[in-house]
Structures are given as C-alpha cells and as structure tokens.
Amino acid sequence: MKENFDRFNFAIHKEKEMVSFRKWILAPTALALFAGMASAQVGTNPNLQCQTNVSVTPSLRAEGYTEQTGDITITCTGGASAAVGTAIPQVNVQIFLNTAVTSRLLPIASSTNNASEALLLIDEPGSTLTPIVPGFGPAAPQSVCNTPLTGCTEYIANVGGVAVATGTPTGTTPGPNVFQGIVSGNSVTFFGVPVLPPVTTGYSRVFRITNIRANATALSGGSAAGATPVIASISTSGATALLIQNATPTVGFVQSGLSTSVSSATNFNQCSSYTRASVSTLTFSENFGTSFKTRVAAATNNAYAGQVGNPIQNVPGSIYNSESNFVLQVPSGAYAGLADYGTRLKAQFNAIPAGTRLFVSTVNVLNTITPFTPSGSAGSAANNLTGSNGYPYAQLVTSETTSDGNLTGFFPSVNSTDTASTGTVPIVEVPVVNGSATAVWELVNTNPNTNESVKFAVYLTSTANVAQNSPPAGTATVNLSYAPTPTAAFSASSAAAASSSLTIPRFVADSGAAKNLFNVNICRTVLLYPYVTNIQGFDTGLAIANTSTDPFGTGAQSGSCKLNWYQGATNPAQGDSGTIASGTVYATLASTAVPGFNGYMIAVCNFQFAHGFAFVSDLGARNLAMGYLALVIPDPGTGSRGSNPLSAAGNGSGENIAH
C-alpha cells in the first residue's frame, strides 16, 4: 500500500513538474531561460541568485557501488547585463556527496585526467520543449565541451534582438552546452561553465547535473527512518559568484534492494545415483520496484531491446528506470551514462561434493518442472506486462562481468543443453572447480511499477560409489547476491571508487551466512547383535539381509558390512562380509568367523535397510536354542545417537530400533 501511495505521489509530482516546466518555457516572461537577454537591457537585479531542486529523489540499492543519484537542477535568476561580443563569465561548479562519487571515468585523448560520465547541461538541450530562439535552448544540439579541465569560453551574441551564448565573439552558432565533470574522491567538479545571467525579473537559466553515481554501500546501515539519505553539497567558484539557496539537496535514499531465499535443503543418499535430479529453487526478490533494471529502457518490441543497440536515451530530465542513465557520446568517443549490462543476479555455490555435477535453469522458473515463458520478445517494450505474463524474465549469461556488447548487438546468453529429469525446464551444467561453481542471470524484462521476484532451479547428477566414498557426505551451500561482486580481478576498495575499467553496475558480495542447498548422507545401517557366542558347546548363526529391493520402488543398493567384535580387553580383528547384493542374505557362524568368541558384535553396513538375525544354540540345536533380530541403531555418522544409544534420537540413514 505504501509503495503504491509513493508511486502515485511520484506520478503527480512529476506531472506537475513537467506542466510547470512547459509553462515556464513557453511563457513570454521566460524568454531568457534559453535565449539570455537583449544586450540593450539593463538588469533590475544585479545579483545572480540560484535555487536548487531534485525533481525525483530515487531509491538507491544499498548493495550497489555505482548507484544513480537524482538529477540536480540549478535555476538562476537576476544578474547584470553585458555587451555583445564579450566573454560570458565562467563558474566552477563542484558537487560533494557524503559518499564516494563512482561515475565512470572517460579520460580524454592523450590525458589521464578524471573526466567522467557525469554531465552538466545548460538550458535542457535536446529536449522536446519549444524554444523561444530557434536553434538555441532546447532546440540546440547537445554539444560537449572538449576541454573539461578548463571548460569552454563562450560569448554574448545578438540573435534576433536577443542575447545568446555562442562559441565565437561574432558567431551565431550555439556554444557548447554539455560539460564533463572531473571526479575526485567524493566530489565532481565542472570547470569553466559559462553563466549568462538572465537579468530580467521573471527570467531564468537552468543547469542540469546528471549521471552522478554514488557508492551506496558506505551508507547501507540505514537510519532511524529506515533509509539513509545521500546528501549533495554544492559549491561554486570563479569569475562569477552564484548565490545558491538550498545548496545541500538530498539526491537519493539508500535502502536494501534485494532479498533472497532457498527452498528447503534436499537430502541425497551416497549410495544412490541421480540424473538431473531437482535440488532446490533460488529466489531473488527486489525490495522496491526499481531494484531490477534492464540495461537501457526498451524503446521497441524487438528482442533484447532493453540490452543492446544504441539507445535514444538523451532527453534531459527523463526517467529511464534502467541501469544506464542519460546516454551521450563525448569527444573521446565513449558513451557517458551507458551501463555495461542490466541487473545481474548471482549464485555462488560452495562445498559441492566431489563427484557431483551441478546444473541450473537457463531462465527463471515457476517451479522445478515448469519454466517461465514470456509473452513476446524478452527484454522488449513488454516490460510493463501484467497478469499471467507479468513476471520478470531473466537469462543465464556467460559470466558476471561479460558486457552486453555496447553498440554491437551482442547479448551473452547461455543456451540450454538439456532439460530437467521431470518437466520442461531448460538447464545447463555449470563447472564445479574445487567444490565451487557460479551461475549468473541477467534481467532482460522487468516492470518498474511493482516489486518482483524471480526463481531459478538447481539440479544435480551423481553416480554412487560407496567403496570410494563418492560423493562424500556433506552439505552444499549457496550465497546469493547481485553481480558482479569483488573478485580477484578487483577488490572491494577499488570497486568503491570511480574507475575507467571496472564495469557498471557493480555490487557487494553476499555478506550473510551461506544458505544450505543440499545434503549428501552416507548410506549405512548399523546393526547391534547384543550376544554372540561359540564357547562351552554353543555356537551362533549370524545373518544379514540386504532388503533395499522391495515393492515400494526403493533404489537397489549393494555393499559390504564391517563386523566389529567386542568381548573385553582382547578383541578379534574386524571382519568383512564382502559385498551383499540387494535382495540377498549373508550368513556365517561365529565359530567360523571368530572361534572362541563370547561377547557382542556391531555390523556397519554401507547400504540402507540392512536387517540382521542371530540364532544361538547348542551344537546341533538338540537342547537349547533361541533367536533374535539385531537392533538397528541410529547412525552416529549422520546424526546424534542421543543420550540413550538405543533411542530413536538423531537422524540415522537406516531404520531405528527394529526388533
């Protein structure tokens, strides 16, 4: 309910803002917003005053190192007029955050400066708003200043009786209106920005600052209100002083963006073989509607429109709800604002038993037997589907850092090689190296207007080899997170700073305890023969039946039993029954196995469902004879025997206390 209310308020706020903005542009009194002022005018307000605003304050994922902050607009009024042909005063605009600025670095040619994708735009160039002066303001082409370390000098020219900013003292071509920011730690500075004062009361000039990314992980602790604000502090210097009101706007709120879970850990028996058997489902859920994002805002219904191609994503003030923001090519040839891929989800598998092959679904599933099939092309303009087709869609990719290909049209999806043992889920094997494996999926279709979840299925194949203890008993685990996360390729400290080489986005690893995925339990039955003798004219017949063949569909097992004899200080050597095939019985005499023995015996059989019988009699069973069933005691190798060794406490792999 709260999310819907917030979304409703956001929509109303945005609509009011755009209506107000259009009136502002089109009103006769707003002439100077994009055109400056007539050179003959004399300013009635000699002091240039500016007001900041953040039209949309987004939620930032606490797990993200490169989260997009909201655009800052600086609206200036007043100032003093100047003569045509004179240079426009330049200002350095510096933005400080209460965390590191992590916008991608896009160094200019032959320089190692920290020029970045963060941009400052003058008077909303390239917007769809109607200009007052043709070719200027919103109708001007987006022109990037090619000297970001010093800015660009511009001049006052008279076009149709209106003073405008041009690149030369006598020219009529608009000057550069886009400036790259220089990143240093937790600040970004836009150098040499020309500020043409509006002068006339009621006239304004707008500077938009966009593509500032922030390290949200440093603010991930939350606050008493539930989210931590990202605060920007604005400072100016240069030939003209800007008197800025509200110089410390909030540009975002940090909150946890992801919740994960794993279905109950499945138990597998060491003595049974499995082929693409269902293990578990992994669930990733976003904590707010825009946690999951496609790489770019899908503009067409073509396949992967949300992942590849050259996006038309450069309208000032537009909300794209994608990992990319305002996308524009800069003089170095790079594309500011363009992310490397959409939101990726990572499963890091650990402690996978040797001899076990692991498989995952190549797409998200409804359950372990049914995949989700989107309506239409994945990653298309169907991002806002609702109803039965309204699920998000994700696909397995080759690695957590492989790019979507920028403008080349390549998407690194992994094709399935098989299906699960039951159902139609497409799966593929993920390599297990030293007990670890990784699977990464990318969201190619999302709906920003609702909280979404995706599930992925996990399967395994193993061949029973009890004699070689394969697969060994143990518990496999998994950690779930966004991707990519710091690896040997980059450290957490480097991930938390602006970089020209690290990918965008990037995230912290799962800091929680690993979640149990499946268990491999050893297949044993422990039999206690409480009295065995072959002295004073008596002997004991011993039998062990392998009852894993039954009418209930139990998998047939075979193996041997180790016979452990106990009679006091001196005990016979351990015996071995040899392999007992499923559905057969092993039998021996105590006089044959351990002559002169009087005590008890514990048989440890490496298969389930062993049962034992003993028959004690005098020679020939002429006078005295008795028989009993061996006790099946809980297996201490797979659970606790409890305080009472003959109790049913624990989790034995065989039956408990059978008489």
Image (cartoon, helix red, strand yellow):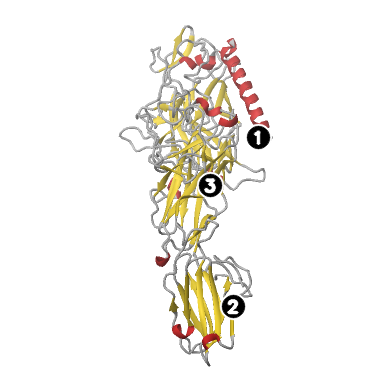
Secondary structure category for the residue under label 1: helix
**Quarter of image, res 552:** bottom right
Question: Residue under circle 3?
Answer: 281
Q: Image check: 56 left or right of 473? A: right
The single residue placed furthest to the bottom in the displayed view is: 536
Q: Is residue 201 visible?
A: no
Identify the amino acid type marked 3: Thr
Quarter holding the N terminus?
top right
Which picture quadrant has residue 16?
Answer: top right
Label 2 or label 1, whichever lies nearer to me, is 2
Residue reaching furthest to the top? 160
Q: Answer left or right for 249 relative to 159.
A: right
Circle 1 sits on which residue?
Answer: 3
Residue topped by disc 2: 628
Badge number at residue 155? none
Q: Quadrant of the C terminus?
A: bottom right
> Which numbered disc, 3 or 1, marks the residue that appears first in the sequence?
1
Q: Is residue 209 above or below residue 39?
A: below
Residue 366 position, x and y percent, is 55, 40
